[in-house]
Amino acid sequence: MDPTQLKAPQMSDPQRLSGCPAPAKLNLFLHVVGRRADGYHLLQTAFRLLDWGDTLDFALRADGALRRVNDVPGVAQDDDLVIRAARLLQRATGCRLGADITLHKVLPMGGGIGGGSSDAATTLIALNRLWNTGLRRAELQTLGLQLGADVPVFIFGRDAFAEGVGEALQPLTLPAAWYVVVFPNVGVPTAEIFRAPELTRDTPVIKIADFVTSTTRNDLQPVACSRFPEVKRVIDWLAQHAPARMTGSGACVFAETVSESDADRIAASCPERWQAWKVRSLSRHPMYEWLQ
């Protein structure tokens, strides 16, 4: 499948925003380096944005109501991070406007590629513009952290080296690349992986200058593979073509390829019981310029 080629929407109508992109991400590595007293894990990771993702439409409402106007299988409206993000922005700014929101879901759920977090980030960015609430990038990142540790990086809008619980971000300059992403058609619950007693929680801290994929790993991968064997099967299959690694807490597995044609070839050979995509890197979020 060809990449989506995500683009920023044109704001020709002050009452509506259509096709707002919510790109996926990869964790090029993910180390668990400690645990806070409140139970949150301390991480180091490299986030890479992808030119592939969901899109959202927003229509202004004057009555303050927030509605997701289409069905998203498996996600109740009140549990949807999109609606939660919109409510959070309303509360934080005292805004009395509302919105009808349509979520066009492309990314697999439970894949470790940040779909729900990216949807929430795009909601904050888009409604900040549509409602003229005027929050700056850093303020939106702080809000986003209340929704989940991965939300701030999508508002940050660039490839990033992350620390803390994932919110302490530094820009990371990476060469453009093509990837194959494979979803084993199983969802991996993040909370279960982080609760696992066998999870490594004391990986030594590295410096950003020391980051190379060949000397790093995903500490969550062994736990996910032991509990969800299909993830390991995907890793073993993809590793026959290129070095393969799980992203986030799973279940998606990725490999960088030497060329677009190589990515095409590998994705086309994926067994039918899984889903595979050819995707390319994205240097900046398409809506990056919307924030200061």
Image (cartoon, grey):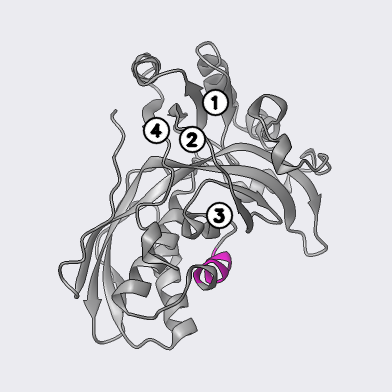
Q: Which mark is residue 150?
A: 3
- What element does badge 4 sit on? strand
Quadrant of res 142? bottom right
Q: Is residue 192 magenta?
A: no
**Badge 4 amino acid:** Arg
Give the Cα distance between marks 3 and 1: 25 Å
Classify residue 275 as left or right of residue 49. Answer: left
- Asked whether disc 1 touches disc 2, contact meaning CB atoms under 8 Å apart, the reply is yes
| Extent of the magenta region | 140-147
The local crowd at label 4, few if under 14, some if 14 to 19, many if 20 or more residues have their Cα within 10 Å, is: many
Extreme-left residue of the structure = 13
Residue 80 in view of the camera:
no
Please report whichever mark, 3 or 4, sits nearer to the chain's N-terminal start. 3
Dot 1 crowding, Cα within 10 Å, few <14, some 14–19, many 20+? some
Is disc 2 placed on a helix, strand or loop?
Answer: loop
Which residue is painted at 60% across and 31% down in the image?
228
Pinpoint residue 110: horizontal percent, then vertical percent. 49, 44
The Cα atoms of the two marked residues, 1 and 2, are separated by 8 Å
| Amino acid type at image mark 3 | Asp
Q: Which residue is mark 1?
A: 230
The disc placed on residue 155 is none
Q: Which residue is mark 4?
A: 280
Q: Earlier in the sequence, mark 3 or mark 1?
A: 3
Identity of the residue drawn at 77% across and 59% down = 39
- Disc 4 from disc 1: Cα separation: 25 Å
